């Protein structure tokens, strides 16, 4: 898995402790299921994480039960200093 991180995202992650947790969140929309990526600087309750890689100065954690890793994971800052992740260029996991 290749991790692509913008410089603003790298700085914000460092300010928040140097760890990034990325998990999936499933919901229903438009008659079907939708899975999107959610990030945080602390592990979510009830989700077991595993350390995926150390990416340019921060630790990246993904759900331990994640069956398939993306080819690329993009990490950027969006909307009022929120770190967001994009799996193979998409905010939604297909």
Image: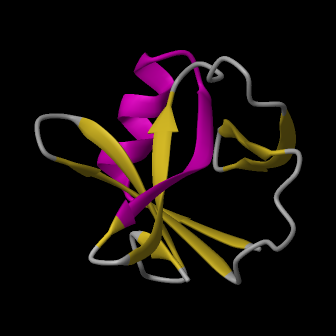
The quadrant of the image that shows the N terminus is bottom right
Near-viewer residue (12 or 71): 71
Which quadrant of the structure image shows residue 9?
top left
**For residue 81, side relative to residue 22 (left or right):** left
Farthest residue toward the left? 80
Give the residue at x 59% y 18%: 42
Vertical side of 80 occupied by 2: above or below:
below
**For residue 30, side relative to residue 88 (left or right):** left
Q: Position of residue 88 (x, y in %)?
A: 54, 83
Give the residue at x 20% y 34%: 81
Q: Which residues make up the magenta segment?
A: 6-28
Give the residue at x 62% y 23%: 44
Q: Is residue 18 magenta?
A: yes
Vertical side of 45 occupied by 68: above or below:
below
Give the residue at x 45% y 42%: 10
Q: Position of residue 93 (x, y in %)?
A: 54, 74
């Amino acid at each position: 898995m290749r991790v692509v991180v913008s410089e603003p995202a790298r700085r914000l992650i460092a300010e928040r402790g140097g760890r990034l947790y990325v998990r999936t969140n499933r919901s229903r929309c438009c008659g079907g299921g939708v899975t999107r990526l959610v990030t945080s600087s602390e592990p979510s309750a009830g989700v077991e994480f595993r350390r995926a890689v150390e990416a340019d100065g921060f630790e990246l954690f993904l759900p331990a039960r994640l069956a398939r890793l993306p080819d690329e994971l993009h990490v950027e800052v969006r909307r009022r200093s929120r770190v967001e992740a994009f799996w193979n260029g998409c905010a939604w996991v297909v």
